[in-house]
Image (cartoon, rainbow, N blue to C red):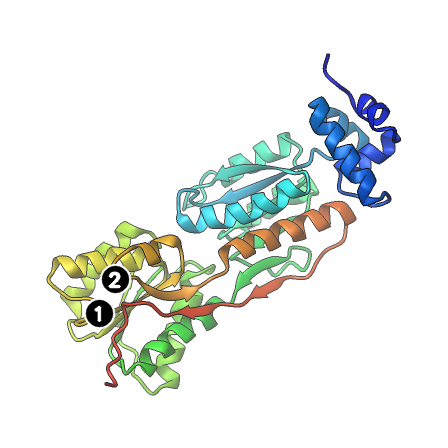
Amino acid sequence: MIPTIRDVAREANVSIATVSRVLNGLTGYSDKTKQKVIKTIEDMGYHPNAIARFLNNRRTQTIGVMFPAVTSEFASAVLQGIEEFALERGYSVLVCNTEVDGNRTMKYLQVLRERQIDGIIVVSEVLKHEYKHLLETMKVPIVLVSSESDDPDIPYVRVDDRQASYDAVCYLINKGHRDIAMISGSPDDPVAGRPRLQGYKDALYDKGIPYRSSRVVYGDFHYDSGGTAMEALLKQDKGVTAVFAATDEMAVGAMNVALQHGIRVPDDLSFMGYDNIRLSRMIYPALSTVGQPLLALGQEAASKLITMIETGKVVPSLVASHKIVERQTVMDLRT
């Protein structure tokens, strides 16, 4: 016979309300009582019924997470942070792959509405007007990761992409590089494309280095486009000493093409990435990059969303810190 919450309460010699509070991470009991309830749950093999939980507090204990590309290392690191925090708080996570162009976003929003999820985390995607209209009808809290909105009721968690890009280019300049190219994301992308490109331009300007459009090529943030962009760069401007890529994946794709052309890294050409995913330290030579706290971004997003779900109050946004991660792909030209 499947045990019920009543059976757990009887066996642990506590009230049903106490068992419920332990299950939902609420306060009002001693640590000794908590441990006794948890042990009883484990011994009896009790699993809370999602339908009963919904009827009790009008919540499904489920959050939706929307990614434009769930296969990327960036996405997996952020998702790990979200899931770790959510599971600790008793929430399940439903992951939706909206594709890079967002053509599945409306469909998945409909799915999340039908599932009666309690809140949504949107990663690396702009909230278009049609998305916001549907989200307003769902009446659930939303948190953005690596994006932002001008809506004060929608908090975000992200690094300052313009400043992080600026710092990366200044790092290269401080190593003696003045002929620096960039492999950027789409210039039409307001999430990471435009801010990172602007940081590149601002760093050159502040250091008195002329901006040359021939030294900017574009990709889609993923590995293959980095290689394609590098081929284009080699054809149109051969005078660069360093390449800054807007993601680690594009940087690694570009490095491989450079090596295929007999270009030594970093002796002949230096590379700088962005994100600090595992790939950046797994390749040889290990990639110097801009470090984003990806796991922490996911944890912070989940924390903010669950706080909004459980309190009904809007929480403040967070601009997380970034860092320059020095490895082996940048040559110091000052020596």
> What's the mark number on residue 207?
none
Residue 121 image position (x, y, % from top left) = 58, 47
User: Which residue type carries mark 2?
Assistant: Pro
Tell me if mark 2 has few (under 14), some (14-19) or many (20+) residues whose alpha carbon lies within 10 angstroms of its own.
some
Residue tagged by mark 2? 285
Residue occupying the point 44% across, 42% down: 70
Residue 210 image position (x, y, % from top left) = 29, 83
Would you identify the image quadrant in which residue 249 lies? bottom left
Instruction: Examine the rendering and report whether any part of residue 229 can be seen.
Output: no
Residues marked 2 and 1 touching at CB (< 8 Å): yes
Helix, strand or loop status at disc 1: loop
Instruction: Examine the rendering and report whether any part of residue 175 can be seen.
Output: yes
Would you identify the image quadrant in which residue 297 lies? bottom right
Which mark is first along the chain, 1 or 2? 1
In this view, the residue in front, 281 or 165, is 281
Q: Give the number of the mark in front: 2 or 1.
A: 2
- Give the Cα distance between marks 2 and 1: 8 Å
User: Which residue type carries mark 1?
Assistant: Pro
Residue 20 image position (x, y, % from top left) = 81, 33
Residue 251 image position (x, y, % from top left) = 29, 60
Is 274 rendered above or below residue 310?
Answer: below
